[in-house]
Image: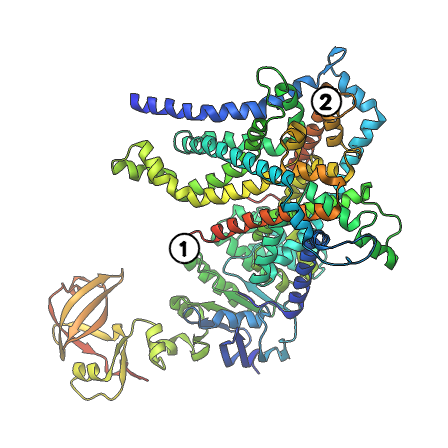
Amino acid sequence: MSFVSVEKLHKSYAGTPVFQDIDCQIQRGEFVTLLGPSGCGKSTLLRCIAGLTPVDSGQILLDGQDIVPLSPQKRGIGMVFQSYALFPNMTVEQNVAFGLRMQKTKAEESQARVREVLELVELGSFAGRYPHQLSGGQCQRVALARSLVTRPRLLLLDEPLSALDARIRKHLREQIRAIQRELGLTTIFVTHDQEEALTMSDRIFLMNQGRIVQSGDAETLYTAPVDLFAAGFIGNYNLLDADSASRVLQRPIASRLAIRPESISLGLDGELDGLVRSHSLLGNVIRYRVEVRGVELVVDVLNRSSADLHPDGQRVSLAIDPTALREVA
Amino acid sequence: MTSSHRGRFLALLCLLPFAVFFFIFQIAPLGWVAVHSLHAESGWGLDNFSKIFASKFYLQALQRSLEISFYSSLFGILIATLGAYSLRQVDSRLRDFVSAFANMTSNFSGVPLAFAFIILLGFNGALTLLLKQIGLLEDFSIYSKSGLILVYTYFQIPLGVLLLYPAFDALREDWRESAALLGASHWQYWRHIGLPVLMPALLGTFVILLANALGAYATVYALTTGNFNVLPIRIAALVAGDISLDPNLASALAMVLVGLMTLVTVVHQWLLKRSYHAR
Amino acid sequence: MRAEPGKGGVYHRVVVYLLFLILLLPLAGTLLYSLATSWSASLLPSGLTLKWYVALWSEPRFLAAFGQSLLVCVGALLLSVVLILPLLFVVHYHFPRLDALMNILILLPFAVPPVVSSVGLLQLYGSGPMAMVGTPWILIGCYFTVALPFMYRAITNNLQAINLRDLMDAAQLLGASTWQAALLVVLPNLRKGLMVALLLSFSFLFGEFVFANLLVGTRYETLQVYLNNMRNSSGHFNSALVISYFAFVLLLTWVANRLNKDKS
């Protein structure tokens, strides 16, 4: 039995449906990501699970109990917001202790648990500070601590890292995942950043326009996108329509093809001839734009040595891994 | 560089007319009052002030001023807080309409307001009769202290709403949601987060309302034809009345009034420091 | 934005309607009284008529008071514009550190009640070389100080919004002198903010009573003083007077609001 089960959820706003008939199942202890572009309904779905936005119809079962009729206070769900939502008039310690206070926990126990969770997020010495004295990353860790201390059954994170800069984002990503694993806490994470989704999740639900387009683990989503949207959203797929594909591969192709850029190799002996149009250095990967028979392909090559550098205008030959050709609808 | 100097000199010259007018009509009168509050028949000293504080009559004026100002500001800010908060939550058409209306009624104070209240709640006023018929009203006079508190509260409300409406900007929606998920009920949210965050704005508005009521002259004058014993009336009576004119005593009373307002501001600053202080 | 649950919505609507009702009541009562043929000691008026308004608007003393109020307010605002615009320009362009001082100075008209100032004004300018008490001139001067905080704040916000320094610099780089830049570039941009500030200050000044009564009284009767002096005449007449005054102020505030919303 799934730990979280969303069944036939239906939500409209001002006459326009946000999502219709959404179904998804999440197992206990899983880290699941809702991934998709802005406006696809992922945040709304999260807020419906939290009880902050009412649903029109459907059920949300948490550990077997339908939580739709419950107020947010009673659902036992923790949530971390994109804007941290730390209470400005309270210290870090008071912020974190707030949930315990609402549960009428005794002062001694509350203090101990607060201290424990602050150590977990590595902010033990910041207990007396106020939110306006903290950096963005520190604020987010306090927000995390605050939602963990009440021992919720489910943790929701609504684009928690979007407001932070890249380096802190990477560090926090790892920290959040590590804490989640240690606590075995069922977690739903919302993001529009595919790299985040791919690195952190056990499973990903890819959403578009109110529908769950594809669900699966990172590997499946990346190597086997189910349709054009999925292929366009994850990774840097070359998306070729049937004509262009036929032209490149010199054999009739019936449907659209998606080819991953790293599954094309550049060398001086291969079946296809092409011309390097431009390149950009992405650090450990060089991204080439190569024209093959009038079709431009993106090719990613690992930057191992100078042998991998091909100047613009050079003629190269390409080899495409046949197992990497995916037909997409 | 000299043209720049000349430019600055010309600029300073532009400031001169303003400074002159401001001095004549604002600074000089205030200065006169401050100086002459210390000038009594017996020469320079604090005689005026001892006279004031020894007189039952003037002490009554002081007490009445404080009472009316305090209660009208208290009721005014309560109504304004509830009103401003709800105003933010309703749809924009209703909100814009009532906001504009509150804006316009803030001009409705002084003599016109006094007349309007006499019509409604005077001895033969329509509301007085209605309430007497229902039996809710026994012995109410708009010309009494409670009557004045009612009238003052009326003109404090629009000012309060105007000042408090933007203050609710400081309350972020995700604090409320976050508190709810952590188990806080509606009241608990307000008690632990909402009100503390709003407190500086609430205190500030309260102080402004207090000062507004303390210095109000037109409304009480028009309502009671200058016969009600509050500070502004006493001050005016000593300089423009028919009986004994004593501008020096008036100055001393005026300084007491200004002193009260300063005291109120100081207490406000002190309270601000103690309560939660946003960056 | 998020949809509000139904229950909360009803409460808020009720509160807002209540607020509206509380504020409306005295106005409504006065309006009704001004249209009533007679309304004494009963719950509702006995009949409706416009005769009080006719009487009001054909009363020469009223028209004189209205006109005199207009004159004084317009005069005060003209004076304000002439004094404050150059001041603001100079402060923001040449001496930005004076802005802090100015912000304290303009608190004075707020912090010092008109009654208090009147004590000094009556003594200083009641007689002698600068005698102005009883003339409209002292009113114009005092009203200038009353309007000062509103005008200063409104135009300051406007100047900050249009980024005075950058505009002036750009104009001067294109060859304009300081004067030309100020008149041709800055002033047109201030027009709307200035209009709104003027209209709002006007409404406020039009309702001023303390200075008008204590410093000038019946010697130059403004509308508010006239209203107070008429207290013993018919209540219906007074109500028509109050409503006419309020309608005029309403018109001004409405125009100011429209201009405000119109800001491009």
Q: Quick check: can you spot residue A113?
A: no
Kindly state the secondary structure of the residue where label 2 is placed. helix
Kindly state the secondary structure of the residue where label 1 is placed. loop
Residue B147's x, y, as percent? 80, 44
Query: Does A53 sit left or right of A219 as displayed?
Result: right
**Which label is found at residue A165?**
1
| Image point (81%, 52%), residue name | C40
Whether A242 is drawn above or below B260: the answer is below
- Pointer 2 local density, CA inside 10 Å: few below 14, some 14–19, many at least 20: many
Q: Quadrant of the C terminus of chain A?
A: bottom left
Mark 1 to mark 2: distance in Å?
Answer: 62 Å
Query: Does C136 sit left or right of C22 as displayed?
Result: left
Task: State whether discs 1 and 2 lie on one chain.
Answer: no
- The chain to which mark 1 is attached is A
Q: Quadrant of residue A167?
A: bottom left
Whether C143 is drawn above or below A209: the answer is above
- The chain to which mark 2 is attached is B
Q: Quadrant of residue B243?
A: top right
